Image: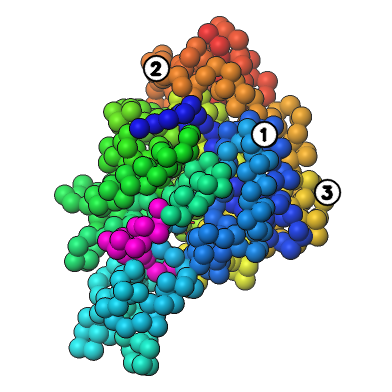
């Protein structure tokens, strides 16, 4: 049952990566106070909600996706009172605060895991996680061939309390992130309680981490291929023709858990759950957003589409059909904290696969090309019906930090692959607010947990605010018109005249959106030009440009 305004059907949700958004106490690490102080800037941008990546107590081995206490704020980010203040400020500004819940695994420092290590094989404490005996004569081999997403094996052997080499535990991510056993009733009850804890505090809802990974296939059979992406595929748009689901991604058993959670969330008005479900094809992902499951799911098929007419047309059409079939809105997203920022991604014809990142040894991007395409891609995306996600900094046209030195890197991927895959730090660098301030206004002291490249100053918000043609003003115009014309709740029709190998055109609630990818100039039709991805386009669109026209 759904109650309330269903605001999420057309919402634009802004992702905050707390470490890198704004530092309110000068220690070089972003925090909740910093977010609250900067929230009015986001209200000016015109978003409906923010999703904050995890701020719970955590040893920060995977930037907070390793939680040791789900009911407290890590002191690096503030206190529960800071969270309450943030929710209050959000209410004043009309911005909901969405919490990032991490149910697939905890930190190895979580009291439950520590108890499991102290307890014996077969104990109730071990049952909450995925402990197994090893293979080989003395159990010296891992129980199966599953790879960790961050590199290496997904199993680590423990030393038993009596000092002997012992069982192995599963960790689909880092060894500091043991997977929970979701067949365990206590785990299930615990998470429902955690949901209530944050809902009672006024959270607008949850982004659920690794929503497709909780349940593992009975017997834990070997994987056919050791892919390290979060879909188990080498590219979101090229799913394998599998006869059965992957043994740890997208198992059917997750749906029962989601339904239990949905009941809890529906006890409260107007709260939502959004799934991070790297599930393919989209017809399968759509199952995650059936009426009694998640409200929304990220659309990774869209995120992984290249800036190419055929790929975008295909994924938009498929998304609208598949999500529409289950009565859910589609969502659209181009960037987040796990992928190369789209202002850089689109500069390349071939990009490294998800999670690998770009380092100083990789061919460096053509920054101008990337930005021009990124602005066009966002202009194309924000005209589409449904919900949209924006990742902090993209409204400034911020590129990836592609030359970050290895000595600063923190992503476990870097360490687990001995630097072979540099990982995701390049999209997580603190964002610039003021061109002339220390750390570009991220912190008052100039401290910054990852160093910002000097050229980040050129993207500072204060240089763009009120400046016609800036990326920030482009985002503001797009979001304002999107709201004004109700595009989120509209419907899309392709305009065949503009759909070709090199261009696309669609209408939504009386707005015609035309994109020129790579072709000869397209003459703009009669009608009022409302916004364009580059200033001054009044008669024709050249390559990598988009225009919105009121018919
Ligand atoms: C997905 C998150 O987005 C990513 O940042 C994290 O490393 C993994 N899940 C593990 O929690």
- Residue 286 visible in this rendered orientation of the protein: no
Of badges 1 and 2, the one in the foreground is: 1
Please identify the quadrant where the N terminus is shown: top left
Q: Tell me where the magenta segment starts and ends, as one range.
A: 175-192
Graded by Cα atoms within 10 Å as few (under 14), some (14 to 19) or many (20 or more), the crowding at tag 3 reads some
Of badges 1 and 3, the one in the foreground is: 1
Residue under pointer 3? 436
Residue found at x 32% / y 44%: 259
Q: Is residue 27 above or below residue 399?
A: below
Identify the residue at the far right of this view: 436
Q: Are marks 1 and 3 in contact (CB under 8 Å)?
A: no
Residue under pointer 1? 93
Residue under pointer 2? 493
N-term-proximal mark, 2 vs 3: 3
Residue found at x 39% / y 31%: 2
Q: Secondary structure at mark 2?
A: strand
């Amino acid at each position: 049952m759904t109650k309330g305004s269903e605001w999420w059907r057309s919402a634009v949700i802004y992702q905050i990566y707390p470490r890198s958004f704004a530092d309110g106490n000068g220690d070089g690490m972003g925090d909740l106070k910093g977010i609250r102080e900067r929230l009015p800037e986001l209200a000016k941008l015109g978003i409906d909600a923010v999703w904050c990546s995890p701020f719970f107590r955590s040893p920060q081995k995977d930037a907070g996706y390793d939680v040791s206490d789900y009911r407290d704020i890590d002191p690096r980010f503030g206190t529960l009172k800071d969270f309450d203040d943030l929710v209050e400020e959000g209410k004043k500004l009309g911005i909901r605060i969405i919490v990032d819940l991490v149910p697939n695994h905890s930190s190895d420092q979580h009291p439950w895991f520590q108890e499991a290590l102290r307890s014996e094989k077969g104990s109730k404490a071990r049952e909450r996680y995925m402990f197994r005996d090893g293979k080989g004569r003395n159990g010296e081999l891992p129980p199966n061939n599953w790879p960790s997403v961050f590199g290496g094996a997904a199993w680590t052997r423990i030393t038993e309390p009596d000092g002997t080499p012992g069982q192995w535990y599963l960790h689909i991510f880092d060894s500091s992130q043991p997977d929970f056993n979701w067949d365990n009733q206590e785990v299930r009850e615990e998470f429902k309680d955690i949901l209530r804890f944050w809902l009672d505090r006024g959270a607008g809802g949850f982004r659920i981490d690794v929503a497709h990974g909780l349940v593992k296939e009975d017997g834990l059979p070997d994987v056919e291929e050791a892919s390290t992406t979060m879909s188990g595929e080498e590219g979101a748009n090229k799913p394998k023709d599998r006869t059965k689901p992957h043994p740890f991604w997208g198992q059917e058993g997750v749906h029962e858990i989601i339904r239990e959670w949905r009941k809890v969330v529906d006890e409260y008005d107007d709260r939502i759950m959004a799934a991070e479900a790297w599930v393919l094809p989209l017809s399968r992902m759509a199952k995650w957003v059936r009426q009694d499951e998640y409200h929304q799911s990220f659309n990774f098929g869209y995120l992984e589409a290249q800036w190419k007419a055929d790929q975008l047309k295909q994924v938009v059409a498929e998304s609208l059909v598949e999500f529409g079939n289950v009565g859910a809105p589609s969502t659209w997203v181009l960037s987040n904290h796990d992928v190369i920022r789209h202002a850089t991604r689109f500069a390349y014809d071939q990009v490294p696969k998800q999670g690998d990142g770009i380092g100083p040894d990789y061919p460096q991007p053509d920054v101008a090309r990337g930005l021009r395409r990124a602005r066009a891609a966002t202009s194309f995306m924000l005209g589409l019906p449904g919900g949209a996600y924006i990742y902090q900094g993209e409204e400034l046209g911020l590129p990836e930090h592609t030359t970050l030195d290895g000595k600063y890197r923190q992503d476990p991927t870097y360490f687990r692959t001995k630097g072979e895959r540099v990982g995701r730090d390049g999209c997580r660098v603190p964002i610039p607010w003021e061109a002339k301030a220390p750390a570009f206004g991220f912190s008052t002291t100039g401290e910054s947990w990852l160093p910002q490249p000097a050229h980040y100053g050129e993207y500072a918000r204060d240089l763009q605010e009120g400046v016609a043609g800036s990326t920030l003003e482009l985002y503001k115009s797009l979001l304002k018109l999107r709201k004004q014309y109700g595009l989120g709740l509209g419907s899309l029709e392709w305009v065949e005249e503009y759909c070709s190998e090199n261009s696309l055109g669609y209408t939504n609630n009386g707005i015609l959106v035309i994109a020129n990818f790579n072709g000869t100039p397209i003459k703009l039709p009669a009608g009022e030009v409302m916004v364009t991805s580059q200033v001054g386009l009044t008669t024709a669109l050249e390559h990598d440009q988009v225009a919105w026209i009121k018919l």
